[in-house]
Image (cartoon, rainbow, N blue to C red):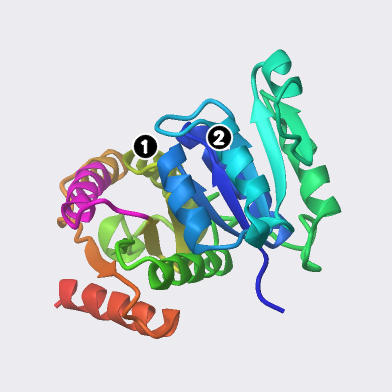
Amino acid sequence: MSEPFVLIVEDDRDIAALFRHVVDMVGYRTETALDGQIAIERLTNSKPDIVILDLNLPEVSGEEILKRIRKDKRLEQTKIIVVSAHAIIANTLPVEPDLTLLKPVSIEQLSIFMKRFALSEISLKDANPWDKNTGLYNQSFFINRLNSSLKQSKENEQYLFAILSFKLDQKHNLNNSLDSKQWVSPLRETAKSLKGAIRPTDTFASFDQDNFYILLENIPHIDIPLEVAARIKEMLEKNLVNINNKAQTPVAVGITVCDGKYKNIDEILQDVKKAQSLLTK
């Protein structure tokens, strides 16, 4: 059985990120479309099990997308969750969705529905996505989203994604007097500060000890990873100085731009490690 797939159509990145987190935890593969036209393109090239659909969208309205899905026999098994801040509009749609949720949608509310329609045995209780030291996503969660990006890239040759990698070595970046327990607090604060340098829909993960990967999905141009890496480098160096009260060795950020030519995620991760090893030489 193939991995179940949910398409989240929402133009607010923060809301899209919230929805995606809930859906990921239930066990679905997720993608986001931030406007109606992108959603139409994805629906043409894919067959989601569920569409979470905002009504107020740029380019093509949610109501029009709802009509198109219901008319497409290829998508007759696709379930549609409409989300809207306007009860009157949501309740007077010419085409009926499977469920209507009014904004603000709570995590609990969406979780209940997603579990009801879950196509896998993964549950929110069983899937812990967090790294306990940093509060970031863990390696397993990052791998799931990386795999989703590769699948989407194979379906759409225009889809690019990138991985930024960097290492915070406590022995070199911090005073030797800081033991492992003391390292956790500044590490968590550093990770928290870096979240502001990426989009809510991107994935910032603690991959293994002192190593951090950021998955930038659906990048419009290859210059974007360079710009994000520059912001992260600046924030890291500033944060490490604040921790240690002295100048630090410049932080290097590895950049790996990816497309559908990769056979699998193992090949991608090998290139990420190569990029990171070149930075330390």
Badge 2: few (under 14), some or many (20 or more) residues near its Cα, within 10 Å?
Answer: few
Give x and y (percent) for residue 189.
43, 41
Q: Amino acid at mark 2?
A: Glu
Question: Which residue has dot 1 on it?
Answer: 196
Q: Residue drawn 52% across and 68% down?
A: 139
Question: Which residue has dot 2 on it?
Answer: 64
**10 or 234, which lies in front?**
10
Q: Residue drawn 16% across and 57% down?
A: 249
Give x and y (percent) for residue 208.
47, 70
Which labelled disc corresponds to residue 53? Answer: none
Tell me which segment is drawn in magenta: 218-236
**66 or 140, which lies in front?**
66
**72 w.r.t. 256: above or below:** above
Q: Can the viewer see residue 122 in this picture?
A: yes
Q: Which mark sits nearer the N-terminus, 1 or 2?
A: 2
Q: Amino acid at mark 1?
A: Gly
**251 w.r.t. 208: above or below:** above
Give x and y (percent) for residue 92.
73, 20
Badge 1: few (under 14), some or many (20 or more) residues near its Cα, within 10 Å?
Answer: few
Q: Which mark is nearer the camera, 1 or 2?
A: 2
Q: Quadrant of residue 245?
A: top left
Q: Residue drawn 59% across and 31% down?
A: 63
